[in-house]
Image (cartoon, helix red, strand yellow):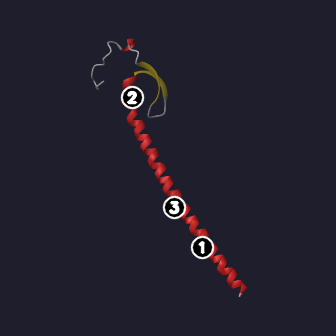
Amino acid sequence: MKPKGKCFCRKCEDCHWLWDWDMTNDEGLRSVKKRCLFQVLGEEIPKIRGSIDGCQGATNETRNHVLRFGKACAESFSLIMDNTKKMITHADS
């Protein structure tokens, strides 16, 4: 179905692709609207793809922060062990 094009059905009311959809607008208000399945797919799939791309970006960023934090923790434990050994050695002398 093209924008401003003609649907392959004669009447939308007779079409079995016309379903009730629970829709939320930009202000967050929810309502039930009758819309063509193909129209909903054409409008909503790009939004879903954008949401998935955003989630993937957030996941990658989180992974990078966790890896940096883990590396910093490992270095901290290594420094604590080294300094503890030095403190014990100096205390024995």
Above-or-below relation of 89 to 26: below
- Of badges 1 and 2, nearer the viewer stands 1
Q: Where is residue 33 in the image (x, y as percent from the top left)?
A: 44, 22
Q: Is mark 3 on a helix, strand or loop?
A: helix
Under mark 3, the amino acid is Arg
Under mark 2, the amino acid is Leu
Above-or-below relation of 24 to 33: below
Under mark 1, the amino acid is Leu
Q: What element carries label 1?
A: helix
Chain-order first, disc 2 or disc 3: 2
Q: Write the residue at 44% across / 41% down.
A: 52
Chain-order first, disc 1 or disc 2: 2
Question: Disc 2 designates what residue?
Answer: 41
Q: Where is residue 50 in the image (x, y as percent from the top left)?
A: 40, 40
Residue pushed farthest right? Answer: 92
Query: Gap between marks 1 and 2, in whole Å?
Result: 56 Å
Closest to the observer: 22 or 28?
A: 22
Question: Disc 3 designates what residue?
Answer: 68
Dot 2 surroundings within 10 Å: few (below 14), some, or many (20 or more)? few
Q: Write the residue at 47% across / 49% down.
A: 58
- For residue 87, what is the image quadrant? bottom right
Disc 1 vs disc 2: Cβ atoms closer than 8 Å? Answer: no
Query: Gap between marks 1 and 3, in whole Å?
Result: 16 Å
Dot 3 surroundings within 10 Å: few (below 14), some, or many (20 or more)? few
Q: Position of residue 39 (x, y in %)?
A: 36, 25
